[in-house]
Amino acid sequence: MAGYNIPDTDYMVSGHVGCPGCGATIAMKFALKAMGEKTMVVIPACCWGVIAGPYPQSSLKVPILQTAFATAGATASGLRAALDMKGDSETTVMAWAGDGGTFDIGIQALSGAVERNEDFIYVCYDNEAYMNTGVQRSSATPFGSRTTTTPGKGWKKNRKKNMVEILAAHRIPYAATASIAYPEDMIRKFDKARRMKGGTRFIHVFATCPTGWRIPSEMSVKIARLAVQSNVFPLYEVENGVKYTINVEGSRPVADYFKIQGRFKHLTDEDFEKIQNMVDKDWELLLRKTSYFDRLT
Amino acid sequence: MAQEPENGKKIPLFISRSHILTDVNKTGSWRFVRPIYREKTAPCSTACPAGQDIPRIEMFFNQNQFEDALNTILFENPFPSVCGRVCFHPCERVCNRAGLDEPVAVHDLERFIGDAAARGELKPGLKKLPAKGKTVCIIGAGPAGMAAGYFLSRMGYSCDIYEARSEPGGILRWGIPRYRLPETVLTFEIDRIKQYGLKISCNTPVTHDFVEDAKNRYQAVFIACGHGRSLKMNIPGEHMADDGLDYLNRLRKGDTAPSTTTAAVIGGGNTAIDVARSLVRQGTKTTLIYRRQKQDMPAFKEEVEMAVEEGVTIMELFSPVKIEKHDEEFVISLQKMKTAGMETDRGRSRVIPDGGPGHQFRTLKIFTAIGAEPADPWLSPLQKTDATLDLSHCTLADSDPPLLYGGDLTNAIQSVPDAVASGKQAAMAIDIFFKQGRHAITDRLNSCRVGNGPALSMARYMGEKQRNRHEDVVSFEHINLDYFPRESRAETKTLSLDDRVRSFDEIKTTLTIDRALKESRRCFNCGICNACDNCRIFCPEIAVTLHAGERQIDLDYCKGCGICVVECPRSAMELQEEG
Ligand SMILES: Cc1ncc(C[n+]2csc(CCOP(=O)(O)OP(=O)(O)O)c2C)c(N)n1
Ligand code: SF4
Ligand SMILES: [Mg+2]
């Protein structure tokens, strides 16, 4: 595409039933631009299970295997094994699961597969709650968020689980974060992951959800960008669990990101200060890991 | 696929398989707002008296399409190299980029393009319309007359220009010192205009009778001969002072004799500053005497600052009352002035005598440069009627064939781009007069305005596609700053102060290509589509299509999320309620 280093061909098609402004659909569009035709997608229960098309329709031009909520890691392992038996080493298996299906119910199957260093790409598109069933909190829901299971004063007081660190601790070849607001960076990472055959590659994609986050649909990309600009969702890569690379360094206050979202509208300046503190500490920790491992390796 | 159950019988395992794509669903029916491509006008363009399409010029520039950039300039202004040097660049004062860091150096980029053309590296490609079989008489080959001739010839008119002096160029040639505008630059741009076939008769001063006769011989007459008579102070001894403009003329003609060791220049406009700075270059200790505050001088601020740097002393709030000669010296009696409130209409302080004792200033030479006026009363309509049209940059007298006055004779601001604006407006008015009649002129001109300002777009007048210069002007809040990191403005190299005061060499240099390209990328390209492709990249519905360079919204699938509109960095799109 003009001005950008982005492949022109799309493997996602129009007419899907994602909500207007759905970040998860933008995520799939970018991912497949990099992955190309020789890809099989494994999708457990999640919004994308619906967006992929009600039978007999499909919104992707590549094969999709729909599977049970908890099983993306196991199904992807099995699919890989089947392809290997057929002698097809060219096709890449890409598991594509939500945050509920990754952080919570799917973590066992995922950890098992990753410990075996299965040869696939596992993508978690993170919209920070169980959106498909009506915005229930997950362990990816951030501190401060209201969901239907953390309503009113009961807004979520626990931190978001750091999934990339969990995956990096498995010492897989590649774990990275990506954002729909940074298409070139995201497509580069998928392309890199595609080429790194032979082990598990994990990509954690930040995908806004206008419906669940109570944000205007047109702000979908802008808010994803703000998450990076404020270091709430840092863009970085970890190779072999130790080699850290930070891609973008943010400098905006977290309040810029939080204040424009309905799910956080109850938060006070005091809360923002607390969150800023948490984000600063996490960022600091990331920087330290980056330089610590740099010295070690 | 099948499994081997215990009893040995095969049970088929059915996995349903989709076989059509979702594009059978016309999800565009979900939409209640619709994105549209709608280009808007950049503030710089509306501020440019010549109405240049600045964001498009900079867009072509940063896409390395220098010839397109040149032609976009030349569509509206025949003098890029001149204006890149002497224009006071009002465009930069309103540049949206100032909200982020500093304005884009528009004038440096214009100069770069103009100079590349002068070196023969770029060829202008503006075509001439078929001959109309009508000839226009233009009086004065200054910037307004030359601009009128340029636009009229492009529209297919023959033009005869009459010029009193020995060469065309007017104030550009005779009144602007070489250190601001080298002669070669001017000559090149005048020659390029001449290539459109206009006829210039020099050494041909014009009388009132000539004009009356011209009305019979020509189909239209445009008078733009500037202000030929210097204003007088009306004080005793004034006749002993030299005329500042005459001095500049002599310098341009090559009279380089050092004038004197000390001199006083009376005035505060650009001519006064030019005279003072030229004197400094001839080794004269120069004092400028101005009756108002320095900050209220009509001269361009930058020029005043440079004059001071070069050693010109400014005496503000002193009004000359008498000039006497004592031996070799002149003595100017001065009245000290003080401010007394503001002038209602001009945004400057009113001044009155401060009532204190008089002052005396001694000097070996005095130059006056307090302004000029038309040399003859017939240089404005002798009688105004209801049919007289007072336009922003020219006046159309009640006569048939049409007789127009323009340039400094009518312009509120006497600048080069305003002169171009006058020539353009006159050319359009004449063309409209012939095509639709006098009554249609005002409306038709209004329909060619750039944004909400008075500047006119020739591209719009001549119906160029994609050049709809919309009345909506892009403001800083409309720019998506996520796409524009801070970047410092290009600095032009200038001669050292020592070299400046010792010669008439040009002070500023043209940007290098690398720096110019980098500078052009600083432009937001406010309001125009520069094919950045953000709309297509981010659309979650894959509903933005590209056919033969045109982006379109596929309304079968667009759900109206509005992401494309927000992610358009430069406000070339907007959301519209579904009707
Ligand atoms: C075992 C099981 N429990 C519950 C469900 C119902 N269910 C379907 S999708 C979903 C939420 C998925 O959330 P997430 O993985 O975050 O994806 P999202 O819908 O947010 O895209 C749930 C709870 C299910 N399909 N299977
Ligand atoms: S950024 Fe460019 S288009 Fe916008 S006002 Fe400045 S010069 Fe004009
Ligand atoms: Mg989710």
Image: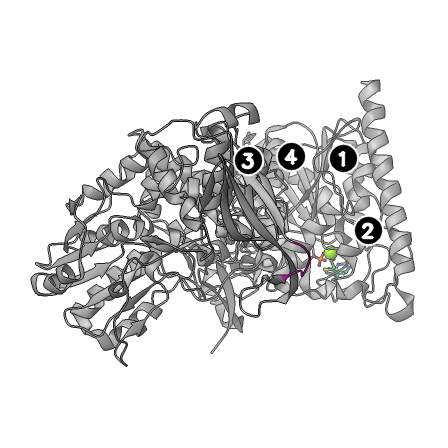
Task: Indicate the position of residue B167 as horizontal and vertical percent values.
Answer: 23, 40
Q: Which mark is residue A81?
A: 4
Q: Which residue is mark 3?
A: B490
Q: CA distance from mark 4 to mark 3?
A: 60 Å
Few, some or many residues within 10 Å of mark 4 (<14, 14–19, 20+) = some
Q: Are marks 4 and 3 on the same chain?
A: no
Q: CA distance from mark 1 to mark 2?
A: 16 Å
Q: CA distance from mark 1 to mark 3?
A: 53 Å
Q: Which residue is mark 2?
A: A104
In primary-sequence order, the first of circles 2 and 4 is 4
In the image, the segment drawn in magenta is B353-357
Q: Is mark 2 within 8 Å of ligand 1?
A: yes
Chain letter behind tag 2: A
Name the residue at 59% across, 34% down. Answer: B309
Q: Nearer the viewer, mark 2 or mark 4?
A: 2
Residue B164 vertical placement versus B119 (above, below): below
B91 or B22: nearer the eye?
B91
Secondary structure at numbered mark 2: helix
Displayed-image quarter of ligand 1: bottom right
Q: CA distance from mark 2 to mark 3?
A: 54 Å
Quarter of image, res A262: bottom right
Name the residue at 18% across, 68% down. Answer: B402
A222 or B514: nearer the eye?
B514
What's the image's color scheme? one colour
Quadrant of the rendering where the C terminus of chain A is positioned: top right
Q: Contact, CB < 8 Å: mark 1 with mark 4?
A: no
Q: Nearer the viewer, mark 1 or mark 4?
A: 1
Q: Which residue is mark 1?
A: A114
Q: The disc labelled 1 sits on which kind of residue? A: Val
Few, some or many residues within 10 Å of mark 2 (<14, 14–19, 20+) = some
Task: Indicate the position of residue A152 as horizontal and vertical percent values.
Answer: 88, 71
